[in-house]
Image (spheres, grey):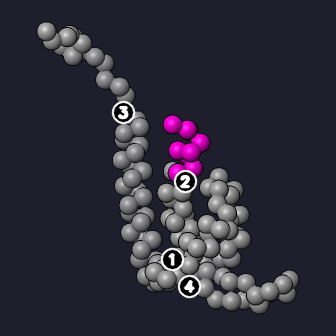
Amino acid sequence: MNLENTQIQMRKGILEYCILQIVSRGEVYASDMLEELTSARIMVVEGTLYPLLTRLRKAGLVEYKWVESSAGPPRKYYKLTAKGTDFLNSLNATWNDLVKSTNLIAAKKPEKPTSTSTKQHT
């Protein structure tokens, strides 16, 4: 197995959750999401982000509005819907359970072998 591939898959697995967390803080532009995700070492490109945002919008979890920009074309700013807030609250509970469970497993020390477990049965 390739360590880097496994790490990438772990990060991809939480991408939707991270995006919803970012959007939950208020109206946000997609390039700002990309910047925050990248600075958090969750590598994502526009070709991944925009389809995910479209899927979240079609699911009714986020919505967007166009805002005129003095520096170019209008920008789409995303925010959570009420349904998105409820969805994220449920994901938060799931995330907290996963972190707790994972930490329990990761913190468990190996058991010392006992004399009966090391004997071979013949």
Q: Is residue 48 left or right of residue 93?
A: right
Disc 1/disc 3 C-alpha distance (Å)? 37 Å
Query: Label 4 crowding class (10 Å Cα cut-off): few <14, some 14-19, many 20+?
Result: many
Tell me which amino acid carries mark 4: Glu
**In which quarter of the view is residue 42 placed?**
bottom right
In the image, residue 6 above or below residue 108: below
Residue underneath mark 4: 63
Q: What residue range appears in magenta?
A: 1-9
Residue 3 seen? yes
Q: Earlier in the sequence, mark 4 or mark 1?
A: 1
According to the image, label 3 marks what residue?
108
What secondary structure is marked by label 2? helix
Instruction: Let me know if residue 40 appears in the view.
Output: no
Name the residue rendered at 62%, 69% in the picture: 49
Q: Which part of the image, by quadrant, shows the C terminus?
A: top left
Amino acid type, residue under disc 3 in the picture: Lys
CA distance separating discs 2 and 4: 24 Å
The tag earlier along the polypeptide, 1 or 3, is 1
